[in-house]
Image (cartoon, grey):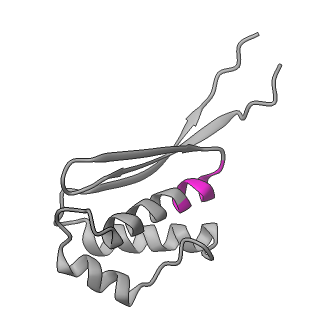
């Protein structure tokens, strides 16, 4: 038997231009951090083709610092993002748990 985790967590972000970003982690907190970092980077990245002004407003009103935020702060920020910006957008953000089967 290995020391592999019993489950993994998948952070998925689908941006408004159809790009998909996924991160596999061993804890839900880290998955939320990866989702928050991805969203933050997409909003602040100068190469993103279309950033609605309300995303920038959201970031100004709800700042997120990927370098200092805790797992809990990341989860709260992602939840705020989903509740305030996603209902009318073609975005998806999810953190899901997947059981891992161990084979001998």
Quarter holding the C terminus is: top right
Query: Which span of residues is magenta-colored?
Result: 27-33
User: Is 8 covered by the magenta stretch?
Assistant: no
Looking at the picture, does residue 21 appear above or below residue 48?
A: above
Look at 62% across and 66% down and name the residue there.
Answer: 71
Look at 38% across and 47% down and name the residue there.
Answer: 21
> How far from the left and from the top, in percent, is residue 93?
36, 55
In the rendered view, does 52 fall on the left or right side of 63? left
Looking at the picture, does residue 94 appear above or below residue 63?
A: above
Residue furthest to the front? 47
Residue 60 position by quadrant: bottom left
In the rendered view, does 16 fall on the left or right side of 66? left
> How far from the left and from the top, in percent, is residue 27?
65, 50
Q: Nearer the viewer, residue 75 or 18?
A: 18
> How far from the left and from the top, in percent, is residue 46?
28, 69
In the rendered view, does 90 fall on the left or right side of 46? left
In the rendered view, does 67 fall on the left or right side of 22? right
Q: How many marks?
A: 0
Looking at the picture, does residue 1 appear above or below residue 48?
A: above
> How far from the left and from the top, in percent, is residue 15?
26, 55
Residue 101 position by quadrant: top right
Q: Magenta stretch: dominant SS?
A: helix
Look at 46% across and 65% down and name the residue there.
Answer: 36
């Amino acid at each position: 038997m290995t020391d592999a985790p019993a489950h993994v967590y998948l952070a998925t972000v689908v941006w408004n231009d159809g790009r998909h970003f996924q991160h596999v982690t061993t804890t839900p907190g880290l998955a939320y951090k990866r989702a928050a970092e991805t969203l933050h980077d997409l909003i602040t990245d100068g190469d993103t083709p279309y950033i609605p002004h309300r995303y920038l407003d959201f970031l100004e009103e709800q700042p997120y610092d990927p370098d200092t935020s805790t797992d809990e702060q990341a989860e709260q920020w992602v939840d705020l993002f989903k509740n305030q910006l996603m209902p009318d957008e073609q975005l998806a953000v999810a953190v899901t748990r997947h059981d891992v089967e161990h084979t001998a």
